[in-house]
Image (tube, rainbow, N blue to C red):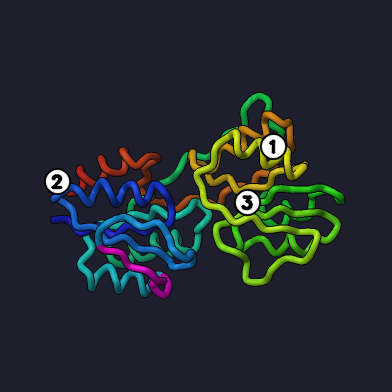
Amino acid sequence: MAKILILGGTMEARRLADILGSDRRFKVVFSLAGRTANPLIPAGEVRIGGFGGADGLADYLESEKITTFVDATHPFANRISQSAATASAATGIPCLWLERKEWRPLKDDRWQMVESIEQAAEILPAGSRPLVTVGRQEIAPFFARLDIKVLARMIEAPETPPLAPHKVLRNRPPFRPEDELLLMRTEHITHLVTKNSGGKATSAKLQAARTLRLPVLMVSRPPAPDLPTAHSVEAMVDMLCKNSRK
């Protein structure tokens, strides 16, 4: 029986764990960093907490006799992805990467690609009312600007509440296009700021912005790890099944 470690934190990771958990060829351990309270977790064995960097992850892989592990973390969680690649190289235990496909602009989209959160915060025009969906750990550059009115949407509240005129909206995906359209109209949103996370769970905001012809500041992804990659849960299941037959 292959013992699979899934580095989770995404909806795709949970789906993968559910599929593999029902297959007798696999024993699955689902790992979360523990940054989100009351996370959605699959059935089966769950591990919560960090590993202590690449060395700690390598020790865990060997001590728990993991046969293959999957990096199914968020596309912007580049620190754990780097640790995963390093731990795989050190131990010889294969690591596979489950990568969501990037969003691509459509004909009527008004995207401006930016290289960082800081750049996105800098170029928002004074007086704007942006909907910012970058997460609580990276919201500070936007809250630091008191000449704009930020509506920051996130799952967990930030450690320090924002000063007026900023506001926090706590919500968890998935979101529907009609709800996103209503939110942007009701809150008089002028810009959307988001990371290029990909996936369907949060893509409705892009549809709403397209309908309203709103500018979108799209933060580019960090470089991808050099690992065998699947772009869907089904493709990852196929890769793991092939590996288990070797």
Towards the viewer: 203 or 87:
203
Q: Residues within 10 Å of mark 1 (few under 14, many from 20)?
A: some
Residue shown at 77%/42% (left/top)?
188
Query: Which of label 2 and label 1 is nearer to you?
Result: 1
Position of residue 26 measured from the top left corner of the image (x, y, whole percent): 18, 53
From the viewer's perspective, is 91 left or right of 169? left
Asked which secondary structure carries label 2, the reply is loop
Position of residue 91 measured from the top left corner of the image (x, y, whole percent): 28, 66
Range shown magenta: 45-53
Mark nearer the N terminus (3 vs 1): 1
Quarter of the rendering containing residue 192? top right
Say which amino acid is labelled 2. Arg
Say which amino acid is labelled 3. Thr
From the viewer's perspective, is 179 left or right of 31? right
Say which amino acid is labelled 1. Trp
Residue where numbered disc 2 is placed: 245
Towards the viewer: 124 or 200:
200
Residue where numbered disc 1 is placed: 111
Quarter of the rendering containing residue 137? bottom right
Residue shown at 31%/43% (left/top)?
236
Q: How far apart are marks 3 and 1 (CA)?
A: 15 Å
Residue where numbered disc 3 is placed: 133
Q: Do the residues labelled 2 and 3 touch (CB within 8 Å)?
A: no
131 in relation to 3, above or below: above
